[in-house]
Image: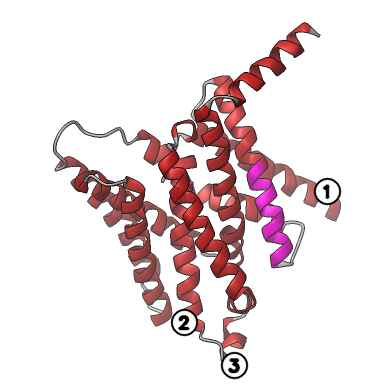
Amino acid sequence: MSSAIIGVAGMIEILGLGFFQNAIIAGILAAIACGIVGSFVVVRRMAATSGGISHAAFGGVGLGFFLGIDPLIGAVIFTIGAACILWYLNVREMQETDTITAAVWAVGMALGIIFISITPGYPPDLFSYLFGNILLVPLTDIFLMALLLGVILAVVITLFPRLVAVTFDPEYAAVMGLPVSALKLVLFLLIALTIVPLISVVGIILVIALLTLPAATARLYTQSLKTMMITAVLIGVVTVLIGIALSYASNLPSGATIIILGAAIYGGALAGRHLLLH
């Protein structure tokens, strides 16, 4: 009984710490973004494309350090640029799309290394950008994450019926007279904007996992995109918050802990669905 009281008191004390409050806010913002946009990614099978965009973000992080600006702002620039390049290739239906996606992936990482190598002074600590450390997210990054989430929500709410049409059946959307190419560009840009908040949570290396795992878990039990998004957001919030607590209590890397937990939830949901069907 006394140990339980001590545990509760300790948790209350931790929740009063500014950095832990920042981590919770950042985690919730990221979970909402990845639940919404990740649903489009999973349904459209754009995981590889999202991986190319996310790794290109490292070039923006390096550019941010080189220019002396917030590295996440640099990441926004690079992810948008990568998204536009990959959208153009997708619209042109080029056969080498996979190869060029890998090239964008590699070039973004390479540019990041070059920018960092020529940045004056001591080399910056890149661990949190590569693998994430949600317990060290500054307030300025939270403001940027909130701004990006606001843009994502506004775009998705405004264009939702059209985005659904393009996601499930682009050919039918074209017959209906919808601007399919422009709507595909919107999807690519939404992915780019979503990746940036996730960098602070799980890092560039693990972004694609958090972007897809909650949505993939939700899709096991629903075919409605709207329901899938809501479920994915809830799964993402639970995953991130429990992951934060576990990483803090066990002194483990936060990004890796969140991803392992997300994978475990997906595995459990997959096993549960298998049992229900058999």
Question: Which residue is disc 1 drawn over?
Answer: 275
Q: Is residue 53 above or below residue 185?
A: above
Q: For the point 61% across and 28% down, which residue is it?
A: 245
Question: Which residue is disc 3 drawn over?
Answer: 175
Quadrant in the rendering for residue 39: bottom right
The secondary structure type at the circle numbered 2 is: helix
Amino acid of disc 2: Ser
Quote the CA–CA distance across marks 2 and 3.
Answer: 13 Å
Main SS, magenta residues: helix
State the residue in front, 209 or 226.
226
**Colour convention:** secondary structure
The local crowd at label 3, few if under 14, some if 14 to 19, many if 20 or more residues have their Cα within 10 Å, is few
Q: For the point 31% across and 46% down, which residue is it?
A: 70
- Taking the image as drawn, is residue 278 in sight? no
Point out the tag, 2 or 3, that comes first from the N-terminus: 3
- Taking the image as drawn, is residue 265 in sight? yes
Point out the tag, 1 or 2, that comes first from the N-terminus: 2
Question: Which residue is disc 2 drawn over?
Answer: 181
Quadrant in the rendering for residue 130: top left
Q: Is residue 110 left or right of residue 3?
A: left
Residues under numbered marks 2 and 3 in contact, where contact means CB atoms less than 8 Å apart = no
Quadrant in the rendering for residue 1: top right
As for residue 265 lying within the magenta part, the answer is no
| Mark 1 or 2, closer to the camera | 2
Residue range in magenta is 225-237
